[in-house]
Image (cartoon, rainbow, N blue to C red):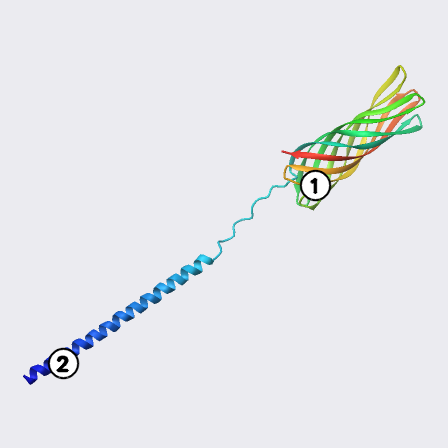
Amino acid sequence: MQVLGLVYAIRLGASAKEGFMGTKFWCGIGLLASVAVGAGAASAADLSVKAPPRGPAPFIASPWDGFYIGGNIGWGGTDFDIGGVTVSGNGVVGGFQTGYNKQFGNFVLGAESDFQLTSIDKTVAGETVKLPWFGTTRARAGFLINPSLLLYGTAGIAYGRLEDSVPRESVKIGGVGWTAGAGIEYAWTPAWSIGAEYLHVDLDHVNASPGGDTRTKTDLGRAKINYRF
C-alpha cells in the first residue's frame, strides 16, 4: 500500500509539473502573438502617414499663346505737311485689332494688324485736311515682367487716306509708310487681356495737293482689350 501511494504521489506531481509547463508554453505563445500583432499595427500606422510619391507638375497653359481679336480707343494728333506748310489737328482714334502671339520662356513674339477710324482734322482759311482712317500691320516682341504682365515693342508698315478739301472741291489720296511704338499688356485671365499702347504713324501721300507732296505724322495713345481663342 505504501508503495502504491508513493507511485500515485509521483504521478500526481509529474502531472502537476506537466500542467505548469504547458501553461507557461501557451502563455509564451500568447505573448509572442501580441508582440507580432502590435508590430504589424505599428508598421501599418507608419505606412499610412507616408506621403504618396509626387507626380509630374501640372501643365499650365500660357495666357499669351494663340490668336486674338479686340478693340481699342484713344486720342491722337497729326501734323499735316502740305507743300512745306505744316498744320496740326487732333481727335479721337478707335478701331479693332487682330493678331497672334507665341511665348518662348520669358519672351513673347507675334504679329498684329489693326484698322482705325479717326476724327482728326484741321481747318485753316477755308481749307480742311483730314485723316479719316489708317491701318497698320506690325511685328511685336516683348518681355514678361511677370507671367501676366508683358512689356513690348512693335514696328511695321502703315497705310491710310488723306482728305484735302475746300468748298465744292475735295481731294482724297492714299498713302503708305511706316509705324513704330511700344506698349504694356496685362492678362487678367487666360482669355482676356487689357493694355495701353503708343504708336507713331508716318505716311507719304504723293501728289496729294497742287502745292506739292503731303506727309502726315500721327502720334497716338490708346487703350486696348483683347480676347484669345
Under mark 2, the amino acid is Ile
> Mark 2 or mark 1, which is nearer the start of the sequence?
2
Task: Answer left or right for 15 relative to 142.
Answer: left
Q: Which mark is residue 186?
A: 1
Q: Position of residue 219 (x, y in %)?
A: 83, 34
Q: Position of residue 67 (x, y in %)?
A: 65, 33
Q: Position of residue 105 (x, y in %)?
A: 66, 45
Left or right placement of residue 123 versus residue 99 in this view: right
Question: In the image, which disc is placed on residue 61?
Answer: none
Tell me the quarter of the image containing the N terminus.
Answer: bottom left
Q: Check disc 2: other Cα within 10 Å, few if <14, some if 14-19, many if 20+.
A: few
| Contact (Cβ within 8 Å) of mark 1 with mark 2 | no
Element type at mark 1:
strand
Which residue is under mark 2? 10
Residue flagged by tag 1: what amino acid is it? Tyr
Q: Is residue 132 toward the left or the right of residue 28 in the image? A: right
